[in-house]
Amino acid sequence: MAKMKGAIVVNTERCKGCELCAVACPLDLIRLADKMVNRRGYRYVEQVNSDACTGCTSCAIVCPDGCITVYRKKVE
Amino acid sequence: MENIISPENIVYEKPTLLNDADMHYCPGCSHGVVHKLIAEVIEEMGMTEKAVGISPVGCAVFAYKYIDIDWQEAAHGRAPAIASAIKRLWPDRLVFTYQGDGDLACIGTAETIHALNRGENIAIIFINNAIYGMTGGQMAPTTLMGMKTATCPYGRQADLHGYPLKITEIAAQLEGTCYVTRQSVHSVAAIRKAKRAIRQAFENSVNRRGSSLVEIVSTCSSGWKKTPVEANKWMEEHMFDFYHVGDLKNNQD
């Protein structure tokens, strides 16, 4: 059966680490990156267990700074 | 994974009207979400060349730096007056103001009420976070009863500070308004509804149906001294009891 596979790309320089995306993700796949900050001194988020992402776009919709680009593809 | 990340598979990205300038808002600020919705709606309506925004005084004072359309900065609270003039002189434009509660519900109350009452063909986006965010979290006219701020550290009391002002309920009573609604942007579902409301308000301005007011009940995590996630939760638990979300008026004639 065809399945939706998703992927996200976080603009880490724009991210402020508010973690609203982490709360919005229904599969709990987003968290703050460990001990990493961007040039503005903010911690930023990263995806964990990226194979499970379905590309539902919830994270990107709630992101106040528009940091997340979502990709989705049907795979057999 | 690599073959998924390819331009033809993009299902969501930052609207192109929202430029790459770093937004000065605090992490998790509702302003960012609303900016994004405005950029998306204007793009989808094909009004990029014909939209004029009026930016306020307050946190959103730099709104003109982030959304690539025509903007006019207004004196504190005077955005609806400037919007009225622009729309009258340039009737085919989509004219909207973007104001916070300090700008709209305090210093600009007169301009707001009279512009709405005259039925100017403008849309007003009203960000209500119940506090003066930019100046450091002082009490605003919209601050809830009992809510602690920098200038009412023991909580807002009726005998000392009066009662919170429901400007959106007042606007719904005015003959000139055609669409008055209260929305929020704390969840995916709420954001989708808020986007439809902004679209409706902007279409009313373009089609000259009268004034529209879209209140967005928002968070101010810095002013409320909470994390963005806690602020959203606090808003759901406290703000919505007083500021009921939904359409207050919708005349489509």
Image (tube, coloured by chain):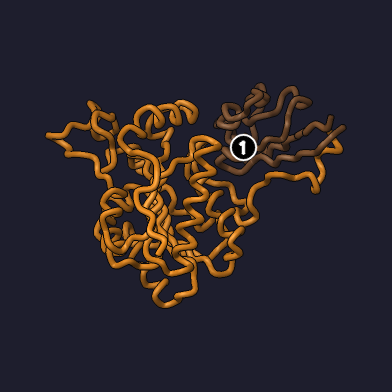
Chain colours: A brown, B orange
> Circle 1: is it few (<14), some (14-19), or many (20+) Cα within 10 Å?
many
Q: Image check: B148 left or right of B187?
A: left
Number of callouts in the render? 1
Residue type at mark 1 is Cys
User: Given the current orientation, which residue lies at the most extreme bottom position?
Assistant: B89
Chain letter of the residue beneath label 1 in the structure image: A
Give the SS element for disc 1.
loop
Considering depth in this image, is B251 or B240 the residue closer to the camera? B251
Q: Horizontal and vertical percent for residue B11?
A: 71, 44
Q: Image check: A69 left or right of B243?
A: right
User: Given the current orientation, which residue lies at the most extreme front position?
Assistant: B253
In this rendering, does residue B197 appear at all? yes
Location of the C terminus of chain B (image quadrant):
bottom left
- From what the image shows, is residue B138 above or below residue B83? above
Q: Horizontal and vertical percent for residue B101?
A: 33, 47
Q: Which residue is mark 1?
A: A15
